Structure formats: structure tokens, C-alpha cells
Image (cartoon, rainbow, N blue to C red):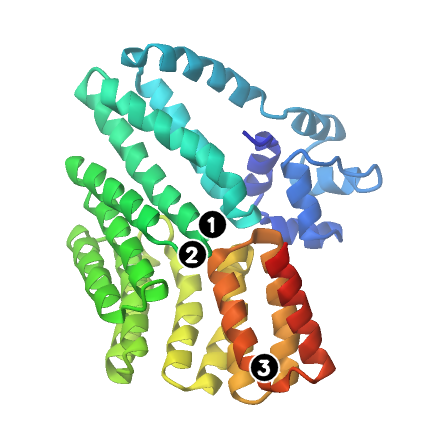
Amino acid sequence: MALRRHRLIQRRKTVGYSQESLAEKLSVDRTTVVRWERADSEPQPWVRPRLADALGVSPEELGDLLADIDSARTRRDERLSAVLKNPRTVDLSTVANLRLTLTQLIDSYDTSPSIAILPNASRLHSEVCLLREHAAGEAVRHALRSVEAAASIFMGQLVWDASQRRSAQAALSYYDQAAHAAKQNKDADTEAQARLRRGFIALYSQGDPKGGLALAAGAEELASRRGDRTLSALALLHIGEANAMMGDRAACERALGQAESQLSRADHDSQDGATDTAGQLNRLAGSCYLHLGDPKRAQLLLERVPSEIRERRKSYAIALGNLAMAHLRQRDLDGATVTLHQVIDAVEESRGGGAVNVLFAVGRELRPWRDQPDVQEVIDRTLALMSS
């Protein structure tokens, strides 16, 4: 499992910095902060006093944060190894550690290629399933099913990404497993998430907006029944996109309006994810207006994608790809090529499957202008990306 400076990461989050905002404060690249937190490199001597000041720690405390590389995980792994040898001894403490490991893997999603995360996520998923099968006591089994459902959703996301969204069957199997575990736990929220994920595949891999609409609507119904406005809003955004793909502007805009209403109400709730879903609103609305043949409206929305999504590199790369498409469909070649270079930069870092697909789609529409030097440079970078 990859190394991490988890105490350093936690300290950054505690004082309210994203990786991007901390990098900006220190006048370094965001990838530099990523490498520090992955324990791939050490902060240079000139930046350490400023880093300590930004984190609100002394130089000695900063040294301790930098030196603490996965020591807690090593102890957890030793305990887990002992439990795996005798699965019936699994207890709630072990489950909590498994959940923490899963959370750390999910946190790495936007800074690591999916294919690099996949082996560790797959191992964790297998361990959880093994322990759930042999666990003694319903409380432990219930907790393990909860982790199993979340791990299955994450695995579905990773294997779909790794195939560049071309192969969906493995992902669908994981989402079915997640839904089954959630249903056993009577966890309607997680069941709705699994159903919505199946809808993503219908929309983006299978070219089936009608099927995607049905799945998103089912997820929205479950979320509404539970009072989860954030998940309801996310489902409504995809209902809007499905309708846009089918050319139904009125139904699309109705769903987008309902999503915005749910998000405004979610601002007053304590549910996690409201801010993140609010960040998705302009991204998905922009995609909707591209499908509806209104690239000018799409551009206005995509240019307002907020900082919450910019920190999520894979989602932001998709937004940039759609923005490039909006420029291109207005015959703004300069805007399209400049934005496409940003997409390629992001894809080179994250290898996000969805962004790769959008990049290639824009590349196909660029072909009539391939004799122009700026366009050819983008095409050359895209081909180099494919070959790597």
C-alpha cells in the first residue's frame, strides 16, 4: 500500500487548506504538495519555515509530521494480518480500521491514476468480503456489509475508469454487490448511490439515456424518501442530463431547477457532500446544454465551475473537456486549444477515464482544422497520451 503522511494531511485539512490553496500560499505547484503528502519527496529547507507557519506548528512539530510516514498503518496491518488468519475473531475495531483504509484510498482518487489505486482497493474489498462471510455476531456483520457496500461502489468506479469507460460489466457487478449489501443493512442511501452509479454507465458507456433516466429516477426516489437532499440533487442533475441527451430541454431544465432547489435546502442540513454536489451543478448543467445544442450557455456555466470541483482533478478535467467542446462548437479555436492543453495536463496526472473520453471526442471534432499548428500540437499531445 502506498505511503502517506497522514498526520500532515490531517493537519492541512484541520487548518482549512486544500492542496491547491496551500500550494498557492507557499508559491509551489500543487503536485509538490501531493508529493510531500505521499512521502515521495521532502520540503526544501527554504520552504519549511513557511510551511510550518501555514500549518500553525513549530519547526520541530513540522519535523514530527514529516517523519510520521504510515506508522499507524503498519500497526493496523499487523492487527489485520492476525485477524485474516482467524476471520471469526474480527471485531468492530478491525472494521473501523478497514473503513479508515478505504477512506484513505477514496481520498487518493483525485490525485492518483485509478489503475494505480486498483490493486490496493481490490485487496481491501476481498478482505472485507472474507471477514463478512466468517464474522460472528450480527453487529460486526452489519458493520462489514456497510464497508463492503462502500468498497464495492469504489471498485466499480475504479474498474470502469481503468477501462476508460469502455468495459462496464465488471463495474455493474460491483454496483449490484453494493446494492445487495446495502439492502441487507436496510441502507437506502447507499442502495440509491449504487443505483445511480449504474445510471452513469447507462448514460456514458452504453449510450442509453432512457435506461440512465430510469436508474437516476429510482435513486432520486430512494434519496427523497430518506430525506437526503444532497443525494437527491445529484440524482436530479443526472436526470437532467439524460433528458438533455434525448433532446427534451423542458424536462432537463425542470430537473436542473429541482436540483438547485434541493441544494439550497441542503445548505441548512448537516449532511456531508452538499458543497461538493453544489460544485457539480454548473459542470453537469454545462454538459446538458452541450447536448441540447446551446454551446454559448454551456460555456457560461462551465466557466463558473467553482473551486470545490477544481480540487477534484478528474471531475474538473471533464468540465474542462466540455468547456473546450463549447469553445469549438462556437468556432473559437484559440479557446478550444488552450483549454485542451489544460485537459491533457490534468489527464497526464490523473488518467481519469471520463476525461480521456471527452478529450478524444473533442479531438475528433478538431480534425477539420488539423492543418493549423495549434490544433496539430493538441493532436500530437493527445496521440502521445494514448501511446503512454
Which residue is nearer to you in this view: 198 or 236?
198
- State the residue at coordinates (31%, 14%): 87
Query: Which residue corresponds to mark 1?
Result: 162
- State the residue at coordinates (35%, 58%): 267
Which element carries disc 1, helix, strand or loop?
A: helix
- Characterize the local packing of mark 3: few (<14), some (14-19) or many (20 or more) Cα atoms within 10 angstroms: few
Whole-angstrom CA distance, mark 1 to mark 3, is 27 Å
**Image quarter in which the C terminus is found:** bottom right
**Image quarter in which the N terminus is found:** top right
Q: What's the residue type where badge 1 is placed?
A: Ala
Task: Report the disc number at residue 367.
Answer: 3
- The percent position of residue 7, horizontal first and vertical second, equals 58, 30
Q: Nearer the viewer, mark 2 or mark 1?
A: 1
Which element carries disc 3, helix, strand or loop?
A: helix
In the image, is 337 to the left or to the right of 310?
Answer: right
Relative vertical location of residue 361 with respect to residue 143 in this rendering, above or below:
below
Q: What's the residue type where badge 2 is placed?
A: Asp
Q: Earlier in the sequence, mark 3 or mark 2?
A: 2
- Characterize the local packing of mark 1: few (<14), some (14-19) or many (20 or more) Cα atoms within 10 angstroms: many
Task: Report the disc number at residue 276.
Answer: 2
Which residue is nearer to you in this view: 244 or 23?
244
- The percent position of residue 324, horizontal first and vertical second, equals 56, 76
